[in-house]
Image (spheres, grey):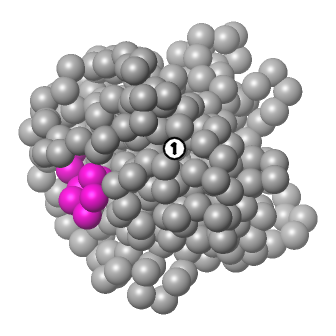
Amino acid sequence: MTLCPMKYPRLLAIASAVALIAAFAACSDPDDPDAMTIPVNAINATSDGTSHHLGSATWSQASSSRLMGASPLAFSVSDEAKVYFSPGNLQYNSTNGRWQFSRRQYLTVATDPDAADGLIDLFGWGTSGWESGAVAIEPQAVDAADSNYWVAGDSLAGLVGDYAEADWAYHNAIVGGGNRARQWRVLQAAEWQYLLGENPTRRGRWGMATLEGSYRGLVVLPDQWAAPAGISFVAGASGWETNRYSLVDWFRMEQSGAVFMPAAGYREGAVSTSIGQTGNYWASDAASGICAHDLFFRAQALDATDIDARHYGFAVRPVLQ
């Protein structure tokens, strides 16, 4: 059996292991925290002022209209393609079946004091609800067998092309994001790698940050960006304190086009952990019969080539193209 390389030391042991078929490559466990769980402050942030539009709404700069709530400026994900990020992580309400975006970029279900009962934002791979032939298709699935997440029974099928409906964001109408299906999507692994890579367009455009002393995560800047007056940005992963912003300062950063991806942790079965310590965000590519690609980050590391077991619950951050 070929083992996936263990990119980072693990501090948390997984209680049980699933028996694997020898022909498959095994995935590593989710990457472990390098710090203790952070306290979460219940705060009342100022409204972000975003208005949502359908159809042919125009793009414009800070504090003005944004198409379906997307970021006002573009992010290159290849030499040819640019995307606009959603206004927050994807969420699903298992009580009413509604898909939506987080009400703030920096909030997760676990850190939002006003999160509704039944709301989830950590999903097994490809669990859009589409009847693909997979065993685990519902967004609330906690099935531990990775093969149950195969799209249409194909161990290497990705969430693109004929199987694009297995993409959470593509298949479903999203409240606050146009409320129509087939508008948003998740990035492919190569796109995460380009976005956060060392190419001339994207070099030096990401860094770790803490907002309001509590909310930890990854800041990603658009291709063309100017820092708001009096606010600085330091690229790289030198700890969560690489950049520190009040919520007022972050409001200005967001209006300038910056995106925040919270360290949402991950879910194993029904148990979530590492909240505020790590971030794992799914890509649309399968890596093996067991694994799929994802973006991983923690305070002092980022890996856009990460792969992990499909049954883990990871965050989803859609884009509009």
Magenta-highlighted residues: 267-274
Q: Position of residue 321 (x, y in %)?
A: 79, 48
Residue at horizontal 59 percent and vertical 71 percent from the top: 129
Identify the residue position indicated by label 1 in the image.
282
Q: Position of residue 253 (x, y in %)?
A: 49, 42
Residue at horizontal 57 percent and vertical 55 percent from the top: 126
Q: Position of residue 157 (x, y in %)?
A: 68, 43
Quadrant of the image occupied by residue 111: bottom left
Q: Compared to 91, does 229 lie above or below?
A: above
Q: Is residue 292 visible?
A: yes
**Does residue 153 appear to the left or right of 245 in the view shown?**
right
Position of the N terminus, as image quadrant, is top left
Residue farthest front in this picture: 22
Secondary structure type for disc 1: strand
Residue farthest right in this picture: 56
Q: Nearer the viewer, residue 63 or 214?
A: 214
Residue at horizontal 84 percent and vertical 64 percent from the top: 57
**Does residue 251 appear to the left or right of 20 in the view shown?**
right
The answer to whether residue 126 is magenta is no
**Does residue 94 appear to the left or right of 150 in the view shown?**
left
Q: Position of residue 180 (x, y in %)?
A: 75, 74
- Amino acid under disc 1: Trp
